[in-house]
Image (cartoon, rainbow, N blue to C red):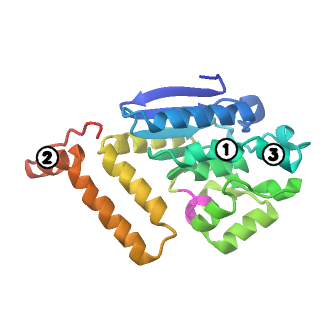
Amino acid sequence: MTSMLIETRPSDGVVLLQLNRPEARNALNLDLRRALSARFLELADDASVRAVVVTGDQAAFAAGADIGMLAARSPQEVVQLGLHRLWKAIADCPKPLIAAVNGFALGAGCELAMHADLIVAGEGARFGQPEVKVGIMPGAGGTQRLIRLIGRAKTMRMVLTGEMISGRQAYDWGLASHLVADEEVLPAALEVAKTIASFSSAACEQIKETVLTAEDLPLDAALALERRSFWLLFDTQGQKEGMAAFLEKRKPRFNPD
């Protein structure tokens, strides 16, 4: 594992990935992007992993892309970097993903946070899509994920002005799922991950897949997908154990499904 990405396992079933480029405010250069992509591909197939937390440090979650990597490239050269494939490994990971955000989450850093299923934001966090200030636009979900989370008017405000919003605004607008004091961001994110990891992995992965897949479907099609996902869970160890524990008035003992 590259030193730019530090991995620990703080509790059973939980993986913590920490971006480690403090000299660049954890800007996402090509090596760090590749390290993230490779690790998420591996975590997707690791039955021992039930939840993933990604974080930076107190100063920055990730302050954007590495502009030096992109500034002089032609359109074709940007395509050949394959950044979209690196993002896809994160987007397609079936494990519940939590972003623990302190400090700056700007540009590609904000987009990385939006790849998470839950964002735990500190009061002092700053989210933004400032690409317009360097003559480009978001290219990894900064228009499309953002509009689905906070609506058209607020998205246009962020992407056309490049202004930053606070952790509290992010929470009030629906971008962040949790708002805590800055010093509580990582402990809170790890506690959420620990809770998720205590449940049936099959149930959590079906929930994630159904919510994300059905999000843009017509209601009838979305409900049909939900029903089928619901039915499939009745063939899992988690359902058998969870319901048996409920009836027996004891705590369930979930194993990887």
- Residue 257, by quadrant, is top left
Q: Are marks 3 and 2 in contact (CB under 8 Å)?
A: no
Regarding mark 2 in the picture, which secondary structure is present there? helix
Q: Residue at x 62, y 54 (%)?
A: 167
User: Which region shows up in magenta?
Assistant: 170-176
Q: Residue at x 78, y 47 (%)?
A: 79
Residue 170 in view of the camera: yes
Residue tagged 2: 245
In the rendered image, residue 231, in percent from the top left (x then y), is placed at: 25, 60
Residue tagged 3: 78
- Residue 148, by quadrant, is bottom right
Mark 3 vs mark 1: in front: 3
Q: Residue at x 63, y 31 (%)?
A: 35
Q: How far apart, in angstroms, are the residues tagged by discs 3 and 1?
A: 28 Å
Report whether 179 appears left or right of 157. left
Residue tagged 1: 103
Q: How far apart, in angstroms, are the residues tagged by discs 3 and 2?
A: 53 Å
When the figure is inspected, residue 249 is found, relative to residue 228, above or below; the finding is above
In the rendered image, residue 31, in percent from the top left (x then y), is placed at: 71, 30
Regarding mark 1 in the picture, which secondary structure is present there? loop
Residue 125 in view of the camera: no
